[in-house]
């Protein structure tokens, strides 16, 4: 694959959430904030050398409109100095194909998408293996790192899968 045409996609599940009467309003728990803070430090160091993104237009951080995903995105964006965008099509009940269609319609650019189960697992499985049912679950605050020339079913390569508990 040509280096210039590849892009990276990090799919992240939000950190552990507390409770609320309405699912979309569930905030991160204290443990969830700690999980995400750990992942944010790792992500900034591993992917961007510990500082702000050198090419801020190269990375976009997009999150579900649900409160816990927005809080997760804010914590991930802070050490990189990047604004968070809301992506309405990545809530827990959303279908995978519209997300793939959206990815294919976007310019070549790296993205961190913060969403929920089962969407993150199904999307990872569909992009890498062509089957959204074969990929195992995502622990809270886990990140799957994917790379592809084209964001179509079965066309991505899984570069890594990281959780707060397995960081070096």
Image (cartoon, rainbow, N blue to C red):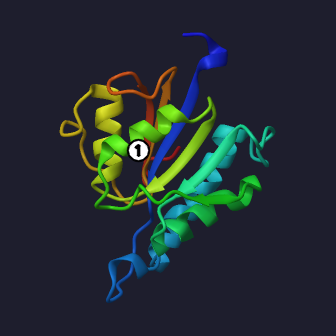
Where the N terminus falls, by quadrant? top right
Above or below: residue 31 compared with residue 2: below
The answer to whether residue 95 shows anywhere in this view is: yes
Give me the residue at 61% from left, 56% from top.
40
Q: Position of residue 98 (x, y in %)?
A: 37, 44
Residue lying at the far left of the rendered structure: 133
Q: How many marks?
A: 1
Report the side of 42 relative to 126 (left or right).
right
Report the front residue among 37 and 19: 19
Give me the residue at 29% from left, 36% from top.
125
Above or below: residue 55 compared with residue 27: above
Badge 1, how many Cα within 10 Å: few under 14, some, many 20+?
Answer: some
Quadrant location of residue 140? bottom left
Q: Position of residue 17 (x, y in %)?
A: 39, 74
Report the side of 97 relative to 54 (left or right).
left
Report the front residue among 151 and 102: 102
Q: Position of residue 123 (x, y in %)?
A: 34, 42
Residue lying at the far top of the rendered structure: 1
Give me the residue at 61% from left, 36% from top.
110
Report the side of 86 relative to 24 (left or right).
right
Report the side of 89 relative to 82 (left or right).
left
Above or below: residue 56 compared with residue 90: above
- Element at label 1: helix
Report the front residue among 121 and 107: 107
Q: Which residue is mark 1?
A: 99
Q: Position of residue 141 (x, y in %)?
A: 44, 58
The answer to whether residue 39 shows anywhere in this view is: no
Give me the residue at 50% from left, 47% from top.
167
């Amino acid at each position: 694959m040509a280096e210039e045409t590849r892009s990276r996609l990090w799919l992240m599940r939000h950190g552990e959430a507390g409770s609320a009467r309405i699912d979309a309003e569930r905030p991160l728990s204290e443990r969830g904030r700690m999980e995400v803070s750990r992942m944010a430090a790792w992500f900034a160091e591993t992917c961007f050398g510990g500082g702000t993104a050198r090419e801020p237009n190269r990375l976009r951080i997009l999150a579900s409109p649900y409160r816990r995903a927005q809080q997760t995105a804010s914590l991930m964006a802070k050490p990189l100095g990047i604004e968070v965008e809301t992506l309405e099509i990545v809530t827990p009940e959303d279908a995978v194909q519209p997300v793939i269609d959206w990815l294919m319609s976007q310019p070549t650019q790296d993205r961190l998408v913060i969403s929920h189960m089962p969407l993150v697992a199904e999307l990872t499985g569909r992009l890498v293996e062509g089957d959204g049912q074969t990929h195992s679950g995502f622990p809270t605050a886990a990140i799957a790192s994917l790379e592809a020339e084209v964001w179509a079913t079965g066309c991505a390569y899984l570069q890594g899968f990281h959780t707060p508990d397995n960081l070096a």
